[in-house]
Amino acid sequence: DIQLTQSPSSVSASVGDRVTITCRASQGISNWLAWYQQKPGKAPKFLIYGASSLQNGVPSRFSGSGSGTDFTLTISSLQPEDSATYYCQQANSFPLTFGGGTKVEVK
Amino acid sequence: DVKLVESGGGMVQPGGSLRLSCAASGFTFSSYSMNWVRQAPGKGLEWVSYISSGGDARYYADFVKGRFTISRDSAKNSLYLQMNSLGDEDTALYYCARSRVGGPTEFDSWGQGTLVTVSS
């Protein structure tokens, strides 16, 4: 199974800050990586697929990059509504797996 | 708009069974692969099972293999998860999620979840 390790597990930043979350895969997955945002009590929201393709309707301050084993999700200018937990997910092979999550707090 | 509505959750004793359902609308259900993903209270996301658009391919996480069965009824636009031999570790919010494309892939739409509690 492919393990995904996210870091940091939590981050606190101010409005307007740039925030970067990393996701490392235990083996190469090309660009088969997705990112989700989950707010408390809500279902996850699909943000990015193919490591860097933004899902329709997702604000352009979100971006993704990486290939192989190392990936990043960047929020270029943090907004109050970005307070949430973010998960990466590999779509390379079954069993599909998620990272452990990164909680983003807006100060 | 895509809508996925889960039902069938509840409290069950260890060793018991439950059948979850997911009613889909707003898209051509028969054209999409579907999944179940769960989240234990206060924990992360965990993929449970996948079924292809035609129902001919099914995959399961190791921790449910032999206990859970995924199925679909395209005439009813519905997805199901039959869960047997439930244990405490199966307590979670179970989400129905649509695959973006066929095969191993991302989940582009999610329901709101149905809560399964396994407790004596």
Image (cartoon, grey):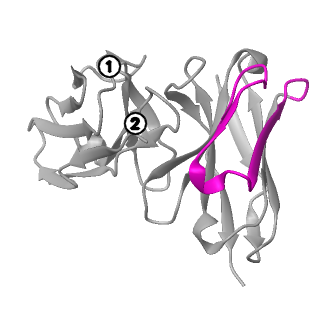
For the image shown, how many numbered marks are present on the structure?
2
Q: In this view, does B41 lie to the left or right of A33?
A: right
Which residue is more in the foreground, B75 or A75?
B75
Q: Residues within 10 Å of mark 1 (few under 14, many from 20)?
A: many
Quarter of the image with the C terminus of chain A is: bottom left
Kindly state the secondary structure of the residue where label 2 is placed: strand
> From the viewer's perspective, is residue A25 above or below residue B33?
below
Residue A39 location, x and y as percent? 40, 49
Q: Which disc number belongs to residue A31?
A: 1
Q: Which residue is drawn at 80% across and 37% down?
A: B71
Q: Is residue A99 left or right of residue B75?
A: left
Dividing the picture into quadrants, the one containing residue A76 is top left
Residue A68 location, x and y as percent? 25, 24
Disc with the residue nearer the chain's start (1 vs 2): 1
Q: Does the magenta stretch include residue B111?
A: no
Range of magenta residues = B50-76
Residue B104 location, x and y as percent? 53, 26
Quarter of the image with the N terminus of chain A is: top left
Q: Which disc number belongs to residue B82?
A: none
Residue farthest along the right direction in this orientation: B75
Task: Read off the chain for label 2.
Answer: A
For badge 2, the amino acid type reads Gln
Q: In this view, does B87 lie to the left or right of B40?
A: right
- Give the residue pinned by disc 2: A89
Which residue is more in the foreground, B105 or A49?
B105
Kindly state the secondary structure of the residue where label 1 is placed: loop
